[in-house]
Image (tube, rainbow, N blue to C red):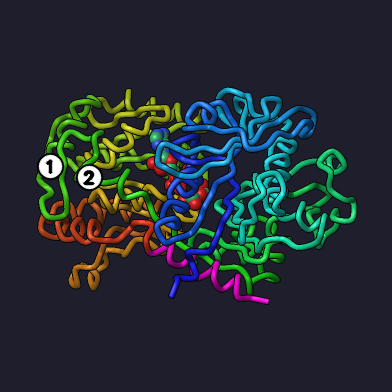
Amino acid sequence: MADASEQLSLLFVASECYPLIKTGGLADVIGALPLALMKAGVNARVLLPGFPAVMKGLKKPVVAAVIPDLFGGPAQIFRGKAATGLDVIVLDAPHLYNISGNPYMDGAKERTDNDIRFAALAFVGSEIARGNLLGWHPDIVHAHDWQAGLVAAYLAAVGGPRPRLVFTIHNLAFQGLFPADRLAKLGLPQAMFQQEGLEYWGQINFLKAGVVYSDRVTTVSPTYAREIQTEAQGMGLHGLLRRRSDVVSGIVNGIDDTVWNPESDSDIPAPYSVRSVKGKAKCKAALQARLGLEVKADAPLFCVVSRLTTQKGIDLILSLIPDIVRQGGQLAVLGSGDEAFEHGFEMAAKDHPGRVATFIGYDEPLAHSLQAGADFILVPSRFEPCGLTQLCGLRYGTVPIVARVGGLADTIIDANEAALDAGVATGIQFAPVSAEAFSFALERAFEIYEDAPAFARVQRAAMKQDVSWTAPAGHYMQLYHGLMAAD
Ligand code: ADP
Ligand code: GLC
């Protein structure tokens, strides 16, 4: 009997996709989840905006459709592949996407025409969904974050038959809010501008549209799915999310275990695995030397690979640098973001030569070197829908020290006494998200590090965790099949 999944065809709509274009974890998910679903027999394709990096990275591009006027300019739809083999549909509309640098920001400011830019993406997504443009009828359209929130709104506006709709919230902090008078420009009916629609305190809310008009709403961990239904973490949408709680669920992300594999990682100086972690010591020494840190095998090396923003609890890390240094630790930071945080780490590196190293910028190979060479990774986020760097940390035996929130709570097993005894601890969790609790967590880290057998046990348990996309893809398959079977 044929597996039902063989028939399933699926359109992802998103604004980023690794390796074509990436500003954060969203790109990792969009680059890897469809590949895992393809392995499970799904015909998955990803619709992306044709930013210059996407156009450049697209393999075997073929023009599949032409749109003479898309929100003020001509557009073409290309089909092609990402270097990973992923099937990609690219919306090439130079008047919207031919911008250099960050896709959403112009320096420190949001780009003012982001509404049209991502409305166009969503509109084209909705047309493909209806079988127009490509003559392909996906069973399910899975849209991600506010940039794709309007797919469901455009489909609701025209009515008639449509695929089933899944909307995933990767970060509720970014909702895509725009002035009400832009509605007509976006081609959406005034009737949708109401509390039960996409209106939010007098503005248009793209993410809310995705939540209101989709059949299922998911987020990237079960804990975050609960948190966003509370006033404290719901970012103003908790009431709506609570009303829709019967269709809201959380599925933890995976990571691409071929990209993140310490046994075959070409960005690290010595391969290692859970069977033989010896290479990790070489990676540590090489990293220390490269970053100008004292080359000391027994100094616990903490790392940070992160956007430098308040969400990520970066201020807490900055406040505890003296503690880390005083106890004999080292800190290696890779990130970019808020200027004050960047400056803070640069100053810390000057104040503590040989003990603190800062690299401001975005650097994939260096992220791999840090994950391989460090002993611990710090993720003290105030909220974290899922978080991927702690998963990379697990895979590389770089013990995560995390705030007990969102996906961090769901993916790390705290090294309390019972868990240590049972050999199941994979990291250190702390709560509440405060400097005091974080400082105590760091003290525990120093203690465990000094007890070499205990540290080795945690490291081994961490590396043994399955952080691949296999299990999450299975959960998405269940969701899709449940949705197809629903009335
Ligand atoms: P978020 O999407 O909220 O930024 P995630 O943990 O989900 O957080 O994903 C962040 C992704 O971006 C990870 O793949 C991480 O390795 C990567 N990353 C973050 N900052 C940098 C950086 N400065 N250089 C290289 N990679 C980075
Ligand atoms: C968002 C979240 C992060 C999550 C990522 C991918 O950027 O901040 O927690 O891992 O999306 O889902």
From the image, give the main secondary structure of the stretch colored magenta. Answer: helix
- Spot the residue most to the front: 1
Q: Amino acid under label 1?
A: Gly
Residue tagged 1: 279
Q: Amino acid under label 2?
A: Pro
Marks 1 and 2, how far apart in space?
9 Å
Does 485 lie within the magenta span? yes
Say whether marks 1 and 2 touch (CB < 8 Å).
yes
| Residue 169 percent across, percent down from the top left | 58, 55
| Residue 210 percent across, percent down from the top left | 69, 56
Residue at image position (32%, 55%) is 440
Residue at image position (70%, 52%) is 131
Q: Dot 2, how many residues are within 10 Å of its Cα: few (below 14), some (14-19), or many (20+)?
A: many
Could you tell me which quadrant the C terminus lies in?
bottom right
Q: Nearer the viewer, residue 405 or 101?
A: 101
Q: Could you tell me how many numbered marks the image carries?
A: 2
Residue 258 left/right relative to 142: left
Q: Nearer the viewer, residue 96 or 278?
A: 96
Magenta extent: 471-487
Q: Dot 1, how many residues are within 10 Å of its Cα: few (below 14), some (14-19), or many (20+)?
A: some
Residue tagged 2: 262
| Quarter assignment of residue 152 | bottom right
Q: Is residue 382 visible?
A: no
| Quarter assignment of residue 366 | top left
Does 455 lie within the magenta span? no
Q: Nearer the viewer, mark 1 or mark 2?
A: 2
Whichever of callouts 1 and 2 sits on the residue coming sooner in the sequence is 2
